[in-house]
Image: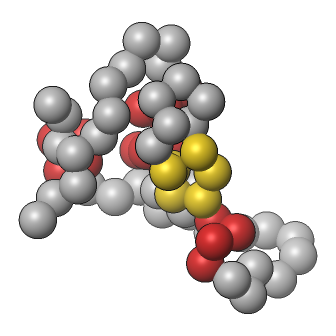
Amino acid sequence: MTKLSDLGPPLTGTRRGSPPDEYPVCHFYLCPRCGQPVDMRDLRQVIWHQKPEHERLEADA
């Protein structure tokens, strides 16, 4: 299983336009292929879950 740290350092961006969401839950969506929550603030996770054939990411301890 691939670990999140295997994808390299975090790739974060800055939000443009409207103010940041007040609730952390607004930063996540469930991947339709594997059902894992994806943090949209981390581009590594978004890109990983866009691949047609992917496995779930293991959280780093």
Question: From this viewpoint, is residue 8 visible?
Answer: no
- Which residue is painted at 32% across and 25% down in the image? 55
As displayed, is residue 38 above or below residue 61? above
Q: Name the spot of residue 28 as percent of width and height, x first.
A: 60, 59
Q: Nearer the viewer, residue 7 or 14?
A: 7
Asked whether, in this view, residue 29 is left or right of residue 59, the answer is right
Instruction: Spot the residue most to the top.
Output: 53
Instruction: Spot the residue most to the bottom.
Output: 22
Q: Name the spot of residue 54 as percent of width and height, x first.
A: 37, 20
Asked whether, in this view, residue 60 is left or right of residue 52, the answer is left
Quarter of the C terminus within the rendering: bottom left
Q: Name the spot of residue 38 as percent of width and height, x first.
A: 51, 50
Residue 59 location, quadrant: bottom left
Question: From this viewpoint, is residue 46 visible?
Answer: yes
- Which residue is painted at 34% across and 58% down in the image? 10
Asked whether, in this view, residue 26 is left or right of residue 40, the answer is right
As displayed, is residue 52 above or below residue 4? above
Colour scheme shown: secondary structure
Quarter of the N terminus within the rendering: top left
As displayed, is residue 55 above or below residue 2? above
Instruction: Spot the residue most to the front.
Output: 35
- Which residue is painted at 70% across and 69% down in the image? 26
